[in-house]
Amino acid sequence: MRLIFSSPDLSKPGALAVFATENSTLLPSAEKLDRQIGGAIKRAISASKFKGEKGQTLKLLAPQGVEASQILVVGLGKIAAIDDLAAQNAGGTVVRELSRSVESTGLVVVDAIKGAEISSAAFAANVAYGALLGSYRFDKYRTKQKPEDKSALSTINIMTSDAAKARKAFGPMSKVAEGVFFTRDLVSEPANILYPISFAARTRALTKLGVKVQILDEKQMAKLGMGALLGVAQGSAQAPRMVAMRWDGAPRAKDKAPIAFVGKGVTFDTGGISIKSAGGMEDMKWDMAGAGVVTGLMHALAARKAKVNAVGVIGLVENMPSSNAQRPGDVVTTMSGQTIEVINTDAEGRLVLADALWWCQKIHKPHTMIDLATLTGAIIISLGHHHAGVFANNDKLAEQLSAVGKATGEAVWRLPLGDAYDKQVRSNIADMKNVGGRDAGSITAAQILQRFVKDEVAWAHIDIAGVAWSNTDAPTVPKGGTAFGVRLLDRLVADYYEQK
Ligand code: BES
Ligand code: MN
Ligand code: ZN
């Protein structure tokens, strides 16, 4: 989708979108348009249930007295509550509705909203951002789509008297959207196409943005002693990889310690010998979402030239049952030297992360480290699909994540850690076992991760099992891979970790 900004011009052809607030109050340019076309918008409003509420829409086809082939009215709801997220959702709604028309150009008229906190430039930029995010489609494997089934919409022209300002504000947002799309592409790919080696190859694209990409093969990982990651990988014909993506954007002190992001990249999780049941197992193609988010995030940070030193580390493996697979009861030695008794081969994410977290700290010495993983089904029982679970050894970091969660709409909820939970993963023959029983399954998983985090590192673990994939369309998040975490962590960096 092409997003452009220009000054208002109602004589342009295309599909037009305008806004109304609660009680169907039209924004000034919509009011003007309504007068120009003899009150047709207000007549249509009276004839419908449209009240200008958030998310409501109304469409007028072939209106007389205007070039546009149709006029879409989108509700914004209460004026005082119109913020960046509301504007993004409105933009997403515009794209969803205009995609149903035959037009290739959408024209969106944006005004200053009297009484709202948001400036007209910020409103316009966020409408564009939401429209772009909502336009995402993964249709590379559809060979038989008829033209009438495809959206013709290819350009959205945001018309505002603040075009220059809006365009400037939209610049970095469009880079974050690129990162979101990169992640959604990775998460959507089937596991016969995206496996550790092909995933690692795709991260090389980041070098064009100035990111240094380092890829470890199994030999190198064996030399480093990554027995936990390699134990998961050994049952698969697909060789594992570990990737580090480093962006040094801090203008002063290029050698300053980075913030690190670590992702679980299980390109397919059958469960291994502790095999999963067949129903829904296809979902396990997106068990690499943590790694996908880290990769898209690194794209976003580098593309918008974030003034920060950041590193993304991803552990890539496929978890398969085979005659060479690890068995329940096996004991593996991690790179840290700690040993793990593998009670259940389906609790593989923590094994991969144990070595990824350790390597990340050893090589990059981050001050802060955040991992993302589709780690436990239990987090879906706790929080459903509307919050990711956060675990942290640092209150400030947890509060920052909560704040940026609210700001970006990628909501997180903190759960506790503690010695009592840690006791659940004690093993009779090794330093720990990889499962802690049914009780508090997400917390005991986090306890295992924490055993691989140095005390002096501010650390948070985000369990994204419930939010990485969506089965319902939302204005800025079409169903499929959500890329949950890219916007959250890009904003975390922007608000708290970038040099000014
Ligand atoms: N990848 C799964 C967790 C998962 C489940 C992600 C559903 C997304 C949707 C993880 O590797 C796993 O299998 N976890 C087990 C842990 C158990 C064996 C302790 C689980 O949650 O059942
Ligand atoms: Mn598993
Ligand atoms: Zn898994």
Image (cartoon, rainbow, N blue to C red):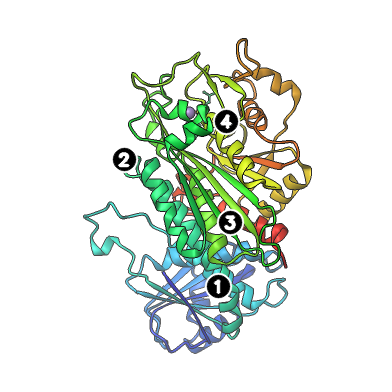
Q: Quadrant of the N terminus?
A: bottom left
Is residue 106 found left or right of 114 in the rendered image? left
| Residue 264 coordinates in the image, percent (x, y) | 52, 39
Q: Residues within 10 Å of mark 1 (few under 14, many from 20)?
A: few
Of pointers 1 and 3, the one earlier in the residue sequence: 1
SS category of the residue bearing label 2 = loop
Q: Is residue 183 left or right of residue 491?
A: left
Look at label 1 and name its amino acid.
Answer: Gly
Residue 487 shows which numbered tag?
Answer: 3
Q: Where's residue 101, x and y in %?
A: 35, 69
274 or 48, nearer to the observer? 274
The residue carrying mark 2 is 192
Rendered position, 394 above or below 30: above
C-alpha gap between disc 4 and disc 3? 31 Å
Q: Label 4, secondary structure: give it.
A: loop
Q: Does label 3 or label 2 sit earlier along the sequence?
A: 2
Asked which secondary structure carries label 1, the reply is helix
The disc, 4 or 2, on the residue closer to the chain's N-terminal end is 2
Residue named by callout 1: 171
